[in-house]
Image (spheres, grey):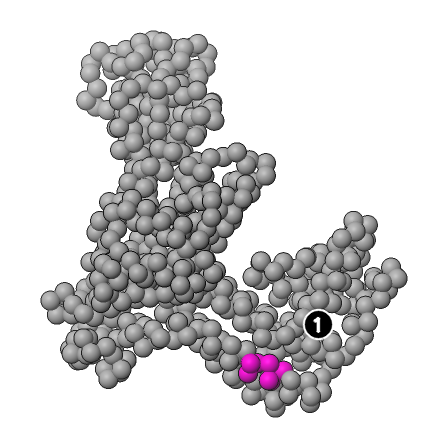
Amino acid sequence: MGGMPQSVYDLDFCTVGCDESGVEGTFYVSQGQADGHQLGEKLVQENDADDLPSSLHLGLLSAAPPTVAVFKEYNLNRHYTTKHEDKYRNLSDEERAREADALMRGAFEKVSLSRRTVTRRVETIAGNLELQLKNRAADFDCFSLALDESCDVRDTAQLLIFLRGITADFQITEELAAMQSIKGTTTGNDLFTEVNACLDMLGLKWDKLAGVTTDGCPNLTEKNVGLLKRMQDKVTEMNPVQKWTFLHCIIHQEVLCKTVLKMNHVVDAVSKTVNFIRARALNHRQFVALLEENESEHGDISYHSNVRWLSLGKVLKSVWDLRDQIQNFCGKKGHDIPELSDEDWVADLGFAVDVTALMNELNVKLQRKGLFVHEMYSAVTAFMRKLQLLSSQVKDNMLTHLPTLKEATRSADHLHKYSSKLEALHGEFSRRFQDFKTLESEMHMVSSPFNCSVDNAPSDVQMELIDLQSDLLLAEHFRSVSLLDFYSSLREENFPHLRRHAQRILVLFGSTYVCEQTFSVMKFNKSKHRSSITDEHLSAVLRTATSDIQTDFNALVQAQNRLDYSH
């Protein structure tokens, strides 16, 4: 039906309100099948044509199929001729279709839905999505998991399990496998029980597990009794020679690296200043008014929150830009900030602003959707090279890439200190990303098979790599298609091991950012104002909110074998 909204409302029968004719007509529509022909036929079957709402006749006449029974067509024509012909006879076909569309949309907007109806339909959609995921999982050659655990507003531990699977033709599916609610303890054994139940529900075998990515919390990673230890034991039990990869979320590690900069004296002073302005309503109102009066680029100043990855850089930048206004405002309030008059501290602030801005830029890159693990690691290695460049340039007082520090008054001692900090940050990146470093050669082989060294490749793919790199047609094909399409085009009989390595790298999660996003959705839907939602309903909401699978509304409508009026 052109122009009619497609939604969960299309699942059940709907009672459409009437206009001046005073009669209601009951009909159903299903996504992908709801056109004027079906609607007209259904309405005529269930109602005498003379009794149909006049607001619907125009659409029925313009969309009636040529195969409609003679008596139905006669009834429709008779009603239209006697009651509506004078009003609509001069309309063109385009105007007639537009008017019908408007009338039908108005009819649907009048349909009322109760909370039970909405609940039932969300459950139905979530069930359909889960069924489709099970069907897809049966075709996975291998899969990986992203795991994260957090408490909701009722202090129930919610374990999110995201699944990424890849098929023989390199089709990737990334979906929420399950949200497992844990009422008691959350030890590694408890979490393993939930993960095992999730895999059993989807029909996935442990011997197809390629890797697991977590945020690194102890109950997941503890060497002796953590979840990963239990999973490793299970995999070894199923297949002693199976190799699988454990990764610590690359974004979490990037955020933790900044602790090596030792900027507490800057962050503490900035936090106290912001708290003085924001904690008291009068101070906050007056400061905002001051910024408006001065037509400042910043309309306000925000709090710093440790759990928000980009928060620190943004707060430091705003304090730097507003340091003169802040100093004048706090001075008038009798709350002097000596740090803003200290050239050493101001220089440290300028350095902190530039470094956190660079790290925020990297963080945003790593948050992009659909990134493969080698792409995320490439962004990190590029950042590490930038740190080396900056360290050497700062020693020579070349501050082209550190514009905020360039504005500050700085001495040779400052430059030496900042260069050392950048070197320490580079060393921290190298130390923290060892789990990705072990995969570097294999990631390079998969992402650039024509440029990698055969000598450094795994022994089982060396012969295949030589064949691949010697084929000029495949080299041209590699440059013209996506990575997934390229490996999908390789013949299994010619490159079996190379394809298998590519599958196990491309299926890995580089971060648990998808879990963090879903926790945000969870906290929005299960808040202190709506805390009684059940775990089952919360799981259904999260599945429908995060899924990329298209709901099969046709199957849902066909599965209903009874009239079910909307409440």
- Badge 1, how many Cα within 10 Å: few under 14, some, many 20+? few
Please provide the residue range marked out in magenta. Answer: 418-424
Amino acid carrying mark 1 in the image: His
Q: Where 434 falls versus 220 (above or below)?
A: below
Residue 213, visible in the rendered structure = no
Q: Residue 387: x percent and y percent?
A: 53, 80
492 with respect to 350 (left or right): left
Identify the residue at image location x=62%, y=66%.
313
**Magenta span contains residue 17:** no
Q: In which quarter of the image is the C terminus?
A: top left
Residue 342: image quadrant is bottom right
Q: Residue 400: x percent and y percent?
A: 60, 82
Identify the residue at image location x=53%, y=67%.
255
401 with respect to 385 (left or right): right
Q: Where 74 falls versus 138 (above or below)?
A: above
Disc 1 target residue: 265
Residue 498, visible in the rendered structure = yes
Q: Nearer the viewer, residue 425 or 536?
A: 536
Label 1: state its secondary structure: helix
Q: Residue 446: x percent and y percent?
A: 28, 71
